[in-house]
Amino acid sequence: MGVLVTGGAGYIGSHMVLELLDQGEEVLVLDNLSTGIRSAVPAEARFVEGDVGDQALVHRLLTEEGIDAIIHFAGSVVVPDSIADPLGYYLNNTCNSRTLLQCAVEAGVKHFIFSSTAAVYGMPEQNPVAEDVPLLPISPYGSSKLMTEIMLADVGQAHDFSYVALRYFNVAGADPSLRSGQSTPRATHLIKVAAQTALGDRPYLEVFGTDYPTPDGTCIRDYIHVSDLARAHLAALDYLRAGGDSQVLNCGYGRGFSVLDVINAVKSAANSDFSVRMVGRRPGDPAALVAAVTRIGQVLDWSPRLDDLDTIVGHALAWERRLIEYRAAS
């Protein structure tokens, strides 16, 4: 049996493909390459260029390729963009997920792992934030992901179908062996942007808001290494195949760093005192967002291996240097 990875040419999806291949899984990647990069998909995985919303294509792949599990990454992920284009986000993140779920039910695919987000929590009253607090997203991005979680729960009640929805906190870093990393041209992830600035790919870095109710006035986030996150998905797949019940689980480390903490870590690792500009807040940014991680440790056979900000930053910088070398050689 095989695993369908939607969005497998993207940042997190490509790391998932590597993890699956390392475990000897048969992998089929479906990606429309709107933000994904074809070269990020290893040759050992079969690749199909197409859209998750293409019902005929998805149904054919699920019925003809021996797929027993879906890991669903395909979607749009930039919070400010979702505020400017809410209908686009509801189409790509919610409507297309509904199509994928329908195809899964019709094809008899019983295991589903969903790439959800901590944005479903909105502005939590306290941190760390647990999975069972009220869900009050403050952006169309968060709402579009929450709608898919609701659909998953309903499908699980109505059909022989189980799922794990993993609520990511801030994903960063790169494969320790540099087989993949964050290559999206318009990436907005802080560590990625800081690494680019440190290496001269950007003239300066902007800090969005310095008046938050945090120790240094900047936002606090829980940063998880992308390879640890990929292993959490693999653990979720093993859990479902062993007969586990549907679950919603936070993916983070349970501790946060401020924007200025991250910038200082990047400056230190790169030995670069790059330009930082303080600007106003962005819409949709909570002051702090840190994961409660008790449940994932209880449910899945998973524990972090790369829980260290300097390690995450070091891998991100190494990947950016590789991209610069690749461009220079092209």
Image (cartoon, helix red, strand yellow):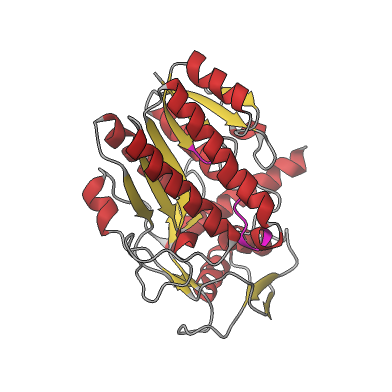
Overall secondary structure of the magenta section: loop
- Residue 64 lies, with reference to residue 76, above or below; the image says above
Q: Quadrant of the N terminus?
A: top left
* The one of 23 and 270 positioned closer to us in this rendering: 23
Task: State the residue lying farthest toward the top.
Answer: 64
- Residue 91 lies, with reference to residue 9, above or below; the image says below
Which percent across, then down, holds residue 250? Answer: 36, 55
Asked if residue 5 can be seen in this view, the reply is: yes
In the rendered structure, the answer to whether residue 171 lies left or right of residue 320 reads: left
Residue at (35, 50) in percent of width and height: 248
* Tag count: 0
* The one of 105 and 306 positioned closer to us in this rendering: 105
Which percent across, then down, holds residue 88? Answer: 68, 50
- Residue 17 lies, with reference to residue 61, above or below; the image says below
Which percent across, then down, holds residue 76? Answer: 62, 49
Asked if residue 179 can be seen in this view, the reply is: no
Which percent across, then down, holds residue 209? Answer: 61, 79
Residue at (58, 69) in percent of width and height: 284
In the rendered structure, the answer to whether residue 72 lies left or right of residue 109 reads: right
In magenta segment, residue 271: no
Task: State the residue lying farthest toward the left.
Answer: 298
* The one of 191 and 109 positioned closer to us in this rendering: 109
In magenta segment, residue 77: yes
Residues in magenta, as a range = 72-81
Residue at (44, 54) in percent of width and height: 168
Quarter of the view holding residue 74: top right
